[in-house]
Image (tube, grey):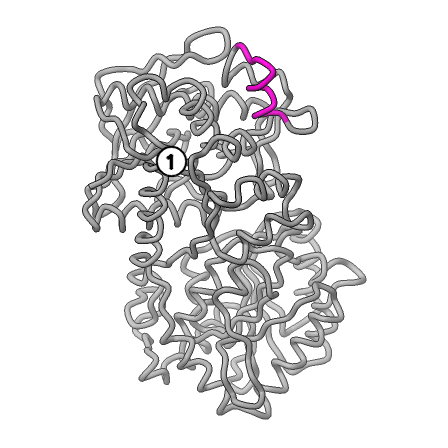
Amino acid sequence: MKKILMLTSETVPYAKTGGLADVVTALAIELKRLGHDVRVLMPRYYHIDRSSLKRHDSALGIWLGSGEEWTAVYEGHLPGTEVPVYFLDHERFFGRDGIYGARPDDGFEDNAARYSLLARGAFQLCRMLHWFPDIIHAHDWPAAPACYLLKKEEGHREFSKTRSVLTIHNLGYQGIFALNDAVYLQPELDVLNLSTIEYSGAFNFLKAGIMTADKITTVSPTYAEEIKRPEYGFGMDGLLRYRERDLRGIINGIDYSIWNPETDEYISPNNFSADNIRNKKLVKKDLQKKAGLKAAANVPLVGIVTRLVDQKGIKELCAPGSGALFSICSDFNIQFVILGSGDSWCEKELNSLSSKLPNLSVKIGYDNHFAHLIEAGSDFFLMPSRYEPCGLNQLYSLSYGTLPIVRRTGGLADTVENYDMETGGGTGFLFDDLRPDVLYDVLKWVVETWEQRMPDILAMRKRAMEKRFAWESSAQEYLEVYSQALKH
């Protein structure tokens, strides 16, 4: 049995901005099921209700910069499990709306202090609990400094047998701050330590983790290779080539108790399966009604659930005057339903397009019920990502027989098999270049396949629904990484 501390800025159901929260929760639950002592530490953000949590009697004194900060500690559990979730409660740092910023595309000015407190607090919490983990598993940039602290400071104390694993969920987000903010992590930095955390004259949280973690993982094998190249490396490619012996890509799993057309409560009573898929047409009809689209079983329906940011290919899809979406909806017998939020220009443009195009439905924001309906009722699911470390929506789509249309990158390349027109094989449609004309052409290919080769579509649906990306196999790979780190 291994003792594992998951250090994270998000976990469902307490706080979520993206797939990171789903991954941390699912992995922790699976590791617990496999017999390991797993605990989670995260901030107690303003929206997390303290009345449902237990407050510990002892407070934590955490040295930060030139003084000591005091935090309360609350404890809850991942729903339906015995996995403890500890919350650092610090009103000045975390008692505000938003997680990283007031809006998804903003960042609070004191994030360096906020998440340095989280990293330092991890060690103080373990002392308070008299529980010293074998592995500190740090997730993304907000937790990465814990790897640095273990290597440079805490590893010589009660944590001498503890090792660190850093998972990079998205290299595009690194936690970059003014260099003088490094005082929150370590008040006095010599030249060697400064070089570990500094990049281009700034304090880089993720670099600190990459340089010091015993092992590094990311969320798909293809992405692990891509981030060693300049076009995907965001300046970290050289360091990742240097650490490549300690770098491994592990595909995320999904929770089939949630994303399963046979049991999904959001599509009940029209549940369906690979062996009895007839009800998928009824879910499609329900989706069309709720989206304000014409009920038409013979028209291919393409779903999108996404963050409306550049990484997701939205510029090529819907930029004013140049995006492919208007031409696709105008030229083809097709329907689109889009759910998401993000860059304000994109939200405005999508609302404008939907007012002009009767076959385009747009809902700005996030609605879990509607997201499930889109995954289950659509015929296809579009993900034209510029890069995609793993991706979860294409895995959800496969489960529901909703064929993914994806760019060949990261986890999308690892999980979707391209349609073969000669054999009828595959589980989706892949393309390489991210340009408006390419998006237009691939949707033309999809529509023609729908109209001319429906037996192939039906065979691909069944094949997609029989694929499984369960957390058990992913968790076993993480356990291998933990064992390697402990030998490091």
Percent across and percent down for residue 484 are 35, 42
Main secondary-structure element of the magenta-colored stretch: helix
Magenta-highlighted residues: 188-198
Asked if residue 9 is positioned above or below residue 446 in the image, the reply reads: above
Given residues 324 and 383, the one toward you in this image is: 383
Location of the N terminus by quadrant is top left
Task: State the residue position of label 1.
Answer: 488
Q: Quadrant of residue 2?
A: top left
- Residue type, label 1: His
In the rendered image, the vertical position of residue 193 relative to residue 380, given as above or below: above
Q: Position of residue 187 (x, y in %)?
A: 52, 11
Residue drawn at point x = 23 percent, y = 26 percent: 131
Question: 99 or 466: which is nearer to us?
Answer: 466
Q: Is residue 445 above or below residue 116?
A: below
197 within the magenta span: yes
Q: Secondary structure at mark 1?
A: loop
Give coordinates of residue 469: x percent, y percent.
Answer: 37, 64
Would you say residue 357 sits in the magenta stretch? no
